Amino acid sequence: MKPINVGLLGIGTVGGGTFTVLRRNEAEITRRAGRAIRISVVADKDTALAKRIAGDSVRITDDAFSVVTDPEIDIVVELIGGYGVAKELVLKAAEESMQRGGGYSVQRVVLEKVRQKLGGSPFAAMS
């Protein structure tokens, strides 16, 4: 069965810890999920730090938007934090999920609430 590919956005204190825990528990997570769940790409502005933590086992990029638009990524984990680019990334990831036919999901509920508050498309505010 095809593994679930995860894109990790941010590999600072929280992201680095998340990466380490997921890697350390990879066999148990695979056993419980019934298929492999692997971090296949890490995005961080500090690519040298990302390489030190992740090594050569994953693709490293400084372009987080390339991760959320990558059709090979099944799950995006945003660990950058803040309200600026992190918000834009989460909204873009949700938009991509819906365009790929991700089905009715929490993203749809959140985006509908945002649309209602803004009185239009939640993505119009990002333009």
Image (cartoon, rainbow, N blue to C red):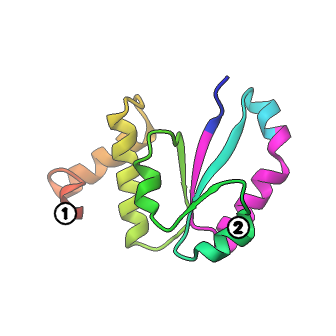
Query: Is residue 109 visible to us here?
Result: no
Does 88 appear in magenta? Answer: no
**Residue 49 found in image quarter:** bottom right
Residue 38 % position (x, y): 69, 44
Residue 20 against residue 29 in the figure, above or below: below
Say whether residue 82 is left or right of residue 114. Answer: right
Does 10 appear in magenta? Answer: yes
Image quarter where the N terminus lies is top right
Residue 103 % position (x, y): 40, 28
Q: Earlier in the sequence, mark 1 or mark 2?
A: 2
Q: Residue at x 42, y 31 (%)?
A: 102
On the image, numbered disc 2 is attached to which residue? 16
Q: Residue at x 50, y 39 (%)?
A: 72
Q: Nearer the viewer, residue 100 or 124?
A: 100
On the image, numbered disc 1 is attached to which residue? 127
Q: Which residues are magenta?
A: 5-28
Distance from the alpha carbon under mark 1 to that under mark 2? 31 Å
Say whether residue 60 is left or right of residue 125. Answer: right
Tag 2: residue type?
Answer: Gly
